[in-house]
Image (cartoon, rainbow, N blue to C red):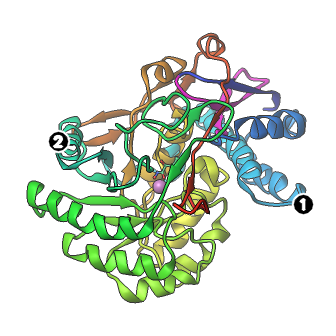
Amino acid sequence: MKIIAADVIVTSPSRNFVTLKLTTDEGLTGLGDATLNGRELAVASYLKDHLAQLLIGRDPHRIEDTWQFLYRSSYWRRGPVTMAAIAAVDMALWDIKGKAAGLPVYQLLGGASRLGLRTYGHASGRDLPELFDSVRENLEEGHTSVRIQTSIPGLKAIYGIASQEQATGERYDYEPAGRGAFPAEEDWDTRAYLNHLPGVFEAVRNEFGPDLPLLHDGHHRMTPIQAAKLGKSLEPYDLFWLEDCTPAENQESLRLVRQHTTTPLAIGEVFNTVWDFQTLIREQLIDYVRAASTHFGGISPLKKVMDYAAQYQIKSGFHGPTDISPVGFAAQCHVGLAIHNYGIQEYMAHSEATNTVFQQSIRFEGGYLRLSDAPGLGVELDEEAAAAHPYQQAYLPYNRLADGTVHDW
Ligand code: EZ4
Ligand code: CO
């Protein structure tokens, strides 16, 4: 079998997605997700202008060889653009291999280790009543764990609050990127945040009891000592995890956080490679791997990092916002179903428009994501429907402190 075409499809059904479609001489096709929120066209160009021609004539069964060829032959390795492009190729090849075998990808990864994937949903609110309503909605939808994000008194717009106004640009879906030619500016004050958050978790615990697993995303905004303080102050509320407590570029700084708190830590949604996790896993500085198949070079490296993590009882908690396309989401769900050290899957339903362009076979039933027996990844792309939604420029916001300093967003 040979690859005879590599097409890149950019579409914006509610939000932008970049998809690679590989076609073989035997008529099989494979899909891969290359969506990089706010920088989509850079990956589309990387694929169209640099990778596509290298794939023509290759044997699609040679997944590992193709991955190593693309990674090592680029000379300048890693980075989100390169790794999203390689991820799309890797996923598309697994999709083809599954279709050729007549098996879903999880079967090729070792078979199912569980019946379905437990999830967590996103609850948010500008105040406690709105937050409580949002938690209840999540429970009604079937989520058995809930992420808690709230407004901070004195701050206008902060990450993760679905009901807040966007500074500029139209909000689409339940996600932070806004359409328009410039990123929206949000405001931030770590001291106000650290003072406010423990009271919110106390109120949520009082309302919903001790059993509901609760999560929180710090979204890279704290210094190590601030993160240590937050982890400690949230201990009475027994979090399932505290996510991205620091930017984590300095991995050794997590030692300090770890020494001070037993709040479980999840990191890695912006990581690109297994090597980004090396210190965090080897020194057992995290409890959950937050990588997304799409930004991490695909299914192959995600399986490798989870096998490495398994040696230290570290589990998966793959990044699952709506900027991971249905193809990327399916890819990591196949990994999640197959590995032994599965933890939890972040899950936000895609919009109706997205689901018209990408027909998904994964179902969310009885609190679990259930994979079908469809061969490959189990996602179909309707190219006509995709063409009806042209790319729209969009940016993630950025932060400034009260004195005007740019801060981590
Ligand atoms: O801000 O995916 O845990 N989830 C997150 C996300 C990210 C977006 C960025 O595109 O942090 O909401
Ligand atoms: Co996050």
The amino acid beneath tag 2 is Arg
Q: Is residue 369 visible?
A: yes
Residue 140: x and y in percent read 18, 36
User: Does 83 appear above or below 7?
Assistant: below
Q: Secondary structure at mark 2?
A: helix
Residue 381: x and y in percent read 59, 21
Q: How packed is label 1: few (under 14 Cα within 10 Å), some, or many (20 or more)?
A: few
Q: Quadrant of residue 196?
A: bottom left
Q: Is residue 117 visible?
A: no
**Is residue 392 toward the left or the right of residue 259 in the image?**
right
**Is residue 79 toward the left or the right of residue 227 in the image?**
right
> Residue 136, which numbered label?
2
Q: How packed is label 2: few (under 14 Cα within 10 Å), some, or many (20 or more)?
A: some
What distance separates the C-alpha of mark 2 from that of mark 1? 50 Å
Mark 2 or 1: in front is 2
The amino acid beneath tag 1 is Tyr
Residue 355: x and y in percent read 47, 22
Q: How many marks?
A: 2
**What is the quadrant of the C terminus in the image?**
bottom right
Front residue of 391 and 305:
391
Front residue of 82 and 244:
244
Q: What residue is drawn where x is 59% and y is 63%?
A: 304
> Residue 75, which numbered label?
1
Q: Which residues are magenta?
A: 14-35
Q: Secondary structure at mark 1?
A: loop
Q: Is mark 2 within 8 Å of ligand 1?
A: no
**What is the quadrant of the N terminus in the image?**
top right
Q: What residue is drawn where x is 55% and y is 32%?
A: 102
**Is residue 306 toward the left or the right of residue 278 in the image?**
left
Q: What residue is drawn where x is 47% and y is 36%?
A: 166
Q: What residue is drawn where x is 29% and y is 45%?
A: 126
